[in-house]
Image (cartoon, rainbow, N blue to C red):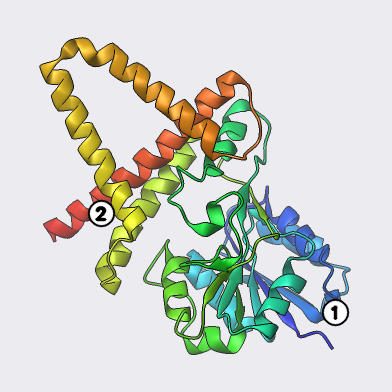
Amino acid sequence: MPALVTCIIPCRNEAASIEGAIDSILAQDYPLENIEVVVVDGCSDDNTAELAKRRLDGHHLRRYDIVLNPDARTPSNLNRGLLWADGEYIVRVDARSRIPANYISTTIAALQTNDYSVVGGRQLARPAVAGLEARSIARALNNKYAMGGSRYRRPGAETGPCDTAYLGVFRTAQLRDTGGWSEEFATNQDFELNQRMADYGPVWFLAGIPVDYHPRPTFRQLFAQYHRFGQWKVVYWQTTGDRPQPRQLALVVVPAVSAAAGLTLLALRPRLATPAAAAVVLGSLAVDHLGTDGPDVSPLGRCVAAAATGTVGLAWWTGVARGLVKQLLR
């Protein structure tokens, strides 16, 4: 008999996305009578909870519930779902994600036949709304050269060990034994959890089960998101004592050194400003062309996608810088 699986959906103000996430669970090739779903809503200001209940009603799930969590933060939402769960396995499904039909069956089989502690697939950004800005942002987020190098973000990445899994599928007993998601981290809680889960076995990336992800559709929202990620990465380093990984260190140091060198050169040779700007633009377009398998866009869209890539990098770098300054001033 198939094992009982609990899907946890943490959310807040996701009325535009929650039904699609639930639909992707209901479309699984895993028996619905062996799936339970808990939507943990951080007291949304919209009708997220009502839409979720309406979508879940009338299906042959093992059970389901909508749990309200006044704390509202993502790790707290996830831990409330973990307390509710009866399943032998936990499957995290975010409101902005759409898991493929074979996701649960494939990940559970991997856990049952191997000593992995966590498994997950690729994050594949797809625009949730029409428009050049949203399509270009999705294209940028699928760029293997611009998104930090994590295996789950790399097009064509092969199955193998990784430092963190996207979303994550877990054995419930191990997840509870390790304490669940740390509520010290408003973001980066997944990475921190995966470091602890590695004590139980390899954290594993599975190719062939790409998960659609609907990113924030505007540059303003994109910048705010990655700026926050950068700040909380510093909190993670400070709290855990871990050091930046080589790819993260490069993302911190290389832009600063390059900017300083470029400004110094321009101060000495102002006539180089125009060719330098042209080189930056051409380099950005080359990164976009070589690194992504995101949605195809027009030449203008490629320029916007290159700008989105720059926005992600600038937001994360300034977030890290802001976090480091805060630590120094304490």
Q: Residue at x 53, y 77 (%)?
A: 79
Q: Is residue 35 above or below residue 73?
A: below
Q: Residue at x 49, y 72 (%)?
A: 76
Q: Quadrant of residue 112?
A: bottom right
- Mark 2 residue type: Gly
Asked whether residue 150 is in view, the answer is yes
> Which residue is tagged 1?
33
Which percent across, then down, holds residue 26?
82, 65
Between 283 and 263, the one nearer to me in the picture? 283
- Mark 1 residue type: Glu
Looking at the rendered structure, the secondary structure element under dot 2 is helix
Which percent across, then down, holds residue 282?
42, 22
Q: Residue at x 65, y 61 (%)?
A: 207
> Which residue is tagged 2?
323
Q: Is residue 47 above or below residue 221?
A: below
Relative horizontal placement of residue 237, taking residue 263 as reference (left or right): right
Quadrant into which the N terminus falls:
bottom right
Which percent across, then down, holds residue 20?
74, 53
Q: Quadrant of residue 326?
A: bottom left
Relative horizontal placement of residue 47, taking residue 23 as reference (left or right): left
Q: Residue at x 43, y 79 (%)?
A: 196
Between 263 and 240, the one nearer to me in the picture? 263
Looking at the rendered structure, the secondary structure element under dot 1 is helix
